[in-house]
Amino acid sequence: MKQRWLGLSNNTKGVTTGLLSAFFFASYLVINRYIYTEFTVDSLAFAFLFNALAGIFAGLSLMQKYNKRKMRSIWQDRYRILLLCIYGLAGMLLLLMGQRYTTSIHASLLVTGSIVATMVFSTLFLKESITTRQKWWVVGMFVGLYVAIVGVQAISFLRGDLIILIGIIFFGLGNVLSRSLMQRHDSAIIPDLRVFLVAVIAGLVYVLFFHSINIFSLVGLWTVVSSLCFWLTMRSFAATVHLVNANHAIVLVNAQIVPASLAGVFLLNEHYSLEKFVGSVIVLVCIYFITWRGRE
């Protein structure tokens, strides 16, 4: 199996890891919603514990890639790394707390908005240009999100939807800063370092202020699985970017809309409608053209 895998082209490997990242992405979104549905947990305590546990897997990965020279170089950007951690923690806390008050289907749709936030902040801070055609596809993407989440009636978002929308602002800021850091340092280290340092902060907060979730209980075990899926999403996405390119990787990982929607319907009995399907298709098509066909 190893020889067969190594014999594949980078494009085939990239598509495979990209689809895996979409699966892991959808998995932790659905598991989080399952935890809120089946157990009585404090959303803030759960959010901090989730991030702390994800850092265990990131830390093990960092140990394998540890290089004193590379870490010394990264230390020179310690203030930017700290800022990256703040953005990452804020975004994940808002996403995880928002999931208490909305469905996994809505959450999977809303997180695609981080693409738009990343584009905006890339323009502001990295001086990257957005073409006219990209702007129109962004408008189309928002239309798709509106149709999928609200429908064709007057605006009526769930409370969790609004919390997640605030969270994607921090995801956009973090993505831009992370991209800048990966251009200066080893791109395989930055994602793990980001998750690990966020976990250190989250772990300290959890130990000091929260003790409501027993890690050896059923809800604790589900939290471990969810945090593992989150780390695997980060790792597989980084591998996809390396094997193909960032634009292809973004499209592939956001295919998570499909498994997240199916799992939400069949495993969590969430409502699905023709409007959600049409809106989801519009979002995926717009992501495709924003990232692949948006250049003039």
Image (cartoon, rainbow, N blue to C red):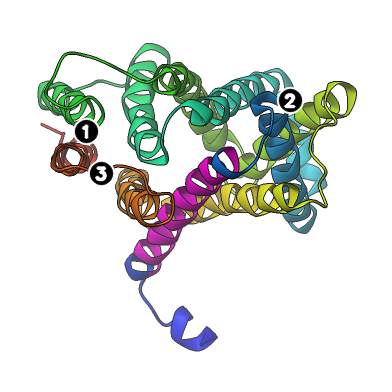
Q: Foreground: 180 or 164?
A: 164
Crowding at mark 2 (Cα within 10 Å: few <14, some 14-19, many 20+): few
- Image location of residue 205, percent across then percent down: 81, 23
Front of the two marks 2 and 3: 3
Local crowd size for mark 1, using a 10 Å CA cut-off: few (<14), some (14–19), many (≥20): many
Q: Is residue 170 left or right of residue 138?
A: right
Could you tell me the amino acid type at mark 2? Gln
- Disc 2 to disc 3, C-alpha distance: 49 Å
Q: Separation of disc 1 and disc 2 at Cα?
A: 44 Å
Q: Which residue is mark 1?
A: 148
Q: Looking at the image, tell me whether mark 2 or mark 3 is earlier in sequence order.
A: 2
Is residue 26 highlighted in magenta? yes
Residue 11 in percent (x, y) is at 33, 65
What kind of secondary structure does the magenta stretch mostly adopt?
helix
Q: Which three-letter amino acid code belongs to the residue tagged 3?
A: Tyr
Q: Which mark is residue 272?
A: 3
295 part of magenta stretch: no
